[in-house]
Amino acid sequence: MVTRRHVLAGAGALGAAAVLGNRTPFAQAQGKKTVILASMGPVTGNWDPTSHTTLGQGNFEKLVFNGLTRALMRDGEADKLEPALAESWTLVDGNTLEFKLRPGVKFHDGKEFSAEDVKATYEYWSDPARPAASFCPGRVDVEVVDPLTVRLKTDKHGYPASAWWFISSVIQVLSAKDVADPKTLEKRPNGTGAFKYVETNGDQNVLHAYDDYFDGRPKIDELIYAYVPDANTRVLGLMNGQYHIAERLEPEQYASLQGNPNIFTRKGMTTENKYLHFRCNKPPFDDPRIRLAACHSIDRSQIMELMGEAALASSCYISPMKFGFNDIPGYPDYNPEEAQRLLAEAGFPKGEGLPQLEYITSIGFYPKTKEYGELITAMLQEQGFNVQLTVLEPAAWEVAIYRRADGQGQGHMCDVGWMTPSPEPDLVLRPNWHSSAALISGVNDPEIDAVLDKERNAPNPEERLKILTGETFPMMAKKVPSFSLFSALTFHGAAKNLEGAVYLPYGPIDLSKADLV
């Protein structure tokens, strides 16, 4: 499955700064409170949430849309949900999950929210033809019991309905009217969230408080979601009052801002791991021995030293905030001798005969990607891999990492993180390594598919945990379609007079109760 994008070719960091440079942070004289959020990720020109899997746009959509539930994702509560558009939910039987919906909710266009919207959304979103179907455990049928009751049914699709328990916090509920008219769905976001989309101006998307929001009108009147790809530009804008929030600070920026009396700083664990993805459908990484040799060439302890506070050492394919996390026994370690043995066994002694390899990374999206990209490149070259590092700004990088319609993708390796709004491990595992999706790696391995299907189809969480830790993760460590480098922490900076913002560990910032004081 291929994610298709139409990326805005805006002015970038300088363009955003120029547009906002003469603007006051909020218009006191007019009585309007405006917050400007400097985002590290772009949004696409397609407003259909099922059309992409990008982090920047996903964060934006959390301001506009709601799911049936919300994932708490707090310490000690990482596997708990709270009500959103659903007030309660019950597993009726192995193939039926029932939701009781919140009454009195309206979409931004005035349409009343009801069970028909849930049915249209879930059946549309889980269609394998939709790029974001990779977030779903499979196709699902939705039974409308009454206007405020729905039942998710999986009996015709061969897996348990419990697989949707955590995913209910991920799927943004759309209007059935919009789903019936995809062109309208693509043109503007129409949700039930705290903020309503108004317009796009270059690299800025303007939102206004939604007066009829079911949880009370926000105190912020206007929110400008500005794409500012350069971390230095985000920080300078925060320091001079141009921005109220700066995402994804570098560790050194976070440390230097801690002494600033006008700025609030935050460090937090995330649901994200950082990966070195191999293009498994392209030589030479279609051979697991070459992938393993590359992994044994990389000394992750040096990467951790470089990353400092921005990374947590782990040897697993999911974050510690995900269900099933454990350090995998036998996970590939730094072992140059084993790397050389594998290269020779695969017919490339000391790397002789390997083609030139391109390693793609970004700058400004994640901390220190260029620096540790250079470090990994040097380590691979030392073992005989002929690697060239390509550094791209975020919009171009997001296009380059995903596979095209022909199944191929740029380069041979990609630096990618994967952050999802739920404790559900399959939100990471299936989009990245099941052959039905494999959005980046292109891996198509029956043994990996089998262990991923087995854990998804487990009859209960206890059995699923055993399969994940005892079969799924060890198989992936053996085949290494990707190399998980570390679990990520993120840093934010914000104006001290912005109170009540909630920084969620999966990327979005909840501003529904925030205020400028």
Image (tube, rainbow, N blue to C red):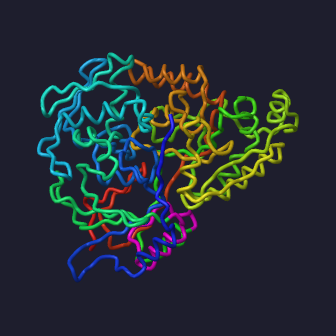
Is residue 174 positioned above or below 40 on the image?
A: above
Is residue 157 positioned above or below 26 on the image?
A: above
Residue 211 at x, y = what percent?
16, 59
Residue 388 at x, y = what percent?
75, 51
Residue 227 belongs to magenta span: no
Residue 236 belongs to magenta span: yes
Q: Residue 134, located in which quarter of the rendered image?
A: top left
Q: Nearer the viewer, residue 295 or 385?
A: 385
- The quarter in which the C terminus is drawn is bottom left
Magenta residues? Answer: 229-252
Instruction: Name which residue lies at 84% across and 39% down.
Output: 351
Q: Nearer the viewer, residue 74 or 386?
A: 386
Residue 150 at x, y = what percent?
20, 29
Residue 310 at x, y = what percent?
56, 56
Instruction: Name which residue lies at 81% across and 28% down.
Output: 346
Locate residue 495 relative to residue 324 in the image: left or right: left
Locate residue 318 relative to residue 85 in the image: left or right: right
Is residue 474 positioned above or below 271 on the image?
A: above
Instruction: Name which residue lies at 46% across and 48% down.
Output: 54
